[in-house]
Image (spheres, rainbow, N blue to C red):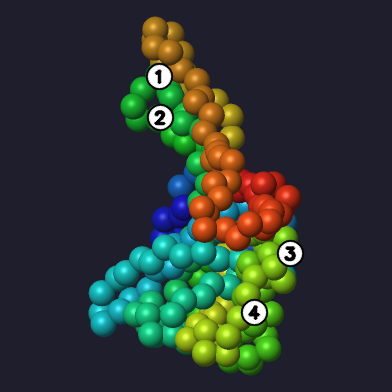
Amino acid sequence: MSDVPESDAPESDARESGAPSERTRVKRYHRLAHYDSATIHAVLDAMPVCNVAYVHEGRPIVTPTLQWRDGDRIYWHGSAASRMIRAVAGQEVCVTVSLIDGLVLARSAYNYNINHRSVMIFGKAEVVTDPDQKKAQLQRFVDGLIPGQWDRLRPVKAQELKATTVLSLPITEASAKVRTGQPEDEAEDYAFPAWAGVVPVRLVVDPPVADPRNLPGVEMPPEVRAFKIG
């Protein structure tokens, strides 16, 4: 997403001014960088899968999980007993979200690339401690995937809420990188007889498969059939 960046913009006002922070400035292919909230939010909303990077007992770890956005924050959840949850609460993390939109085949291996959308967020993970807010965010997560699904499910139990931790991260220090279009070859390589172009890539959602233990008469909600990602 980005190399070690360089910037003289204070982190506190970087997002407000639209400028990157010291850590988020994209150096490699900087022309693909976006620092505006609209682009960053659109990528986060398009892909629930994220990777949370942190340091645990002096060693780097990256944990894949699901994220969702509410305004200028992202949230994720996990077991209160999990290593990741215990390690990142109140600590600095780096969260990334990526989508691949195409394989870009150039006339040289050096210029191979991918069309993609990605976001990187830095900040301190915060535990959602208010029980009502935690329940509301879990409902937002479930309904964000399948609208109206929370109210169709067996009501959540108090012990389940207690065993679940919800973390949040403000989207105040973030950058996006978006690439589209054809290969960018060296000028002399356009005369080389190798096929070049783009192989489009998209995530396909197949028709839902019913659980054979569904009760008679329980119909699939139309929102389940309409589920999509991207």
Question: Which residue type carries mark 4?
Answer: Pro
Crowding around mark 1 (Cα neighbors within 10 Å: few <14, some 14 to 19, many 20+) is: many
Which residue is more in the foreground, 188 or 67?
Answer: 67
Element carrying mark 3: loop
The residue lying toward the viewer, choosing from 82 and 101, is: 82
Task: Estimate the spatial distance between the alpha carbons at disc 2 and disc 4, rounded to whole Å.
Answer: 53 Å
Q: Please report the residue visible at 51 percent of the width from the left and 53 percent of the height from the top.
A: 212
Q: CA distance from mark 3 to mark 2?
A: 46 Å
Q: On screen, 188 above or below 127?
A: above
Please give the residue where the numbered disc 2 appears in the rendered image. Answer: 111
Q: Amino acid at mark 1?
A: Arg
Q: Which residue is mark 1?
A: 107
First in residue order: circle 1 vs circle 4: 1
Front: mark 1 or 4: 4
Q: Is residue 81 left or right of residue 139?
A: left
Q: Secondary structure at mark 4?
A: loop
In percent of width and height, residue 181 lies at 58, 29
Q: Which mark is residue 148?
A: 3
Residue at the spot of label 4: 155
Question: Mark 3 or mark 2, which has the lower sequence index?
Answer: 2
- Which of discs 4 and 3 lies nearer the camera? The answer is 4
